[in-house]
Amino acid sequence: MANLESKKQLKVKELLLEINSNDITRVKKGLNSLKIHGDSSVIRPLLTIIKDQDAEDEQINKEIWQFLHDLSDSSAAPEIITCLKDAAYADLHILLLHSMWNSKLNYSEFLSAIVAKAIKGDFMTALECLTIIENLDGPFEAGSVMESQLLLAESVKDKNKDPQKDQLMSEIATFVKSFDRLAE
């Protein structure tokens, strides 16, 4: 079993090298193979490739983002949330949020992390978070809903800095309140 696992890790490393090659054909081939052989451990390396790419590598970045939008393995959701909290990927946070609401993954268990990101972020961050929250299906943990409500109540102290963001935060609070009845 350990030998099989090390072969898989070696295959994933080879595929990540392909993706990092700056050759769009190799990148596409590597990403297609990652759909079969990859797991959530590839998310950080892919984000690092995007972060380190030059502007002329936009097609490569586009392919990687499409791969992230198409994630369907539920083990990827916690890793995406971890990256969303990581300051090393701060320049990619808006795009990560965008990929979250484009993916088929259910982020309902991460409600409080999404609310916290909306509170800390700017207007565009809050807008992306609202879009994610609007599309959450549940189930919601009662503790996560309560934590989200507390975070929102605490954030009211920062009102009037950006009236547009305040409006979005009000909409987020309305959604979170409606999750009370859906909480387990």
Image: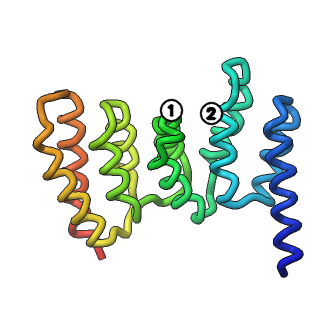
Q: Is residue 119 above or below residue 62?
A: below
Which of the marked residues, 2 or 1, is nearer the chain's N terminus? 2
Graded by Cα atoms within 10 Å as few (under 14), some (14 to 19) or many (20 or more), the crowding at tag 2 reads some
From the image, tell me which residue sits under label 1.
Answer: 91
Residue type at tag 1 = Asp
The residue shown at (22%, 65%) is: 146
Image x and y of residue 136, in percent: 39, 56
- What is the distance, in whole Å, between disc 2 and disc 1 at their CAs? 8 Å
Nearer the observer, 181 or 62: 62
Q: How many marks?
A: 2
- Coordinates of residue 42 in the picture (x, y in percent): 70, 53
The disc placed on residue 51 is 2
Check disc 2 and give the amino acid type.
Lys
Q: Residue at x 59, y 59 (%)?
A: 76
User: Residue 144 location, x and y as percent?
Assistant: 30, 66
Q: Residue furthest bottom?
A: 1
Q: Which residue is depicted at the point 47% across and 42% down? A: 87
Give x and y (percent) for residue 55: 67, 19
Secondary structure under the numbered disc 2 in the rendered image: helix
**Is 159 placed left or right of 71 in the picture?**
left
Crowdedness of circle 1 by 10 Å Cα count: few (<14), some, many (20+)? few
